[in-house]
Image: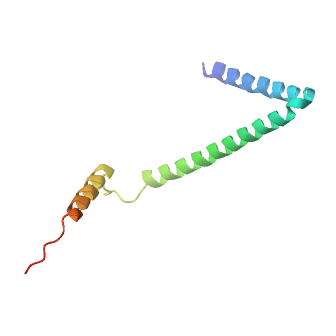
Amino acid sequence: MLTLVTILISSFFIILTGWTLTTYFLKKDSQEFIREELTTLFDICKKFFISLKNLIGVLVRNSFSSESNEKNPVQETVLIEDEQLLNVVRPVNEI
């Protein structure tokens, strides 16, 4: 099953590449549009791989952390909200 999917995806990209090259060289009026779309695709791929690298970095930092007693984010949020509620009350000055 995996081989069939791989063959279908590979043949799709080969056909798309051939179609793009044929249109690029035969239709002179569409060269600018094809060039713009290819530039956009390369920019998207570049951003995708940079984001993927950043995601892996975050996962590695947080998965193999040496601190085992980190606070739960939900508990930390509740504590911050409690502190904000207490800050609304002004301290009483003793006479």
Q: Quadrant of residue 30?
A: top right
Q: Quadrant of residue 90?
A: bottom left
User: Where 62 sits versus 90, above or below?
Assistant: above
> What kind of colouring is applied to the model shown?
rainbow
User: Where 12 sits versus 55, above or below?
Assistant: above
Residue nearest the observer in this picture, 90 or 48: 90
Residue 65 x %, y %: 42, 56
Residue farthest to the front, as pictured:
95
Placement of the C terminus among the 4 image quadrants:
bottom left
Residue 88 x %, y %: 22, 63
Residue 52 x %, y %: 58, 45
Judge left or right: residue 74 versus residue 19.
Answer: left
Residue farthest to the left, as pictured:
95
Residue at image location 88% in from the left, 26% down from the top: 22
Judge left or right: residue 13 versus residue 47.
Answer: right
Residue nearest the observer in this picture, 29 or 78: 29
Q: Quadrant of residue 79?
A: bottom left
Residue 12 x %, y %: 73, 23
Residue nearest the observer in this picture, 55 or 30: 30
Residue at image location 81% in from the left, 34% down from the top: 33
User: Where 33 sits versus 76, above or below?
Assistant: above
Judge left or right: residue 23 versus residue 39.
Answer: right
Placement of the N terminus among the 4 image quadrants:
top right
Residue farthest to the bottom, as pictured:
95
Number of residue marks? 0
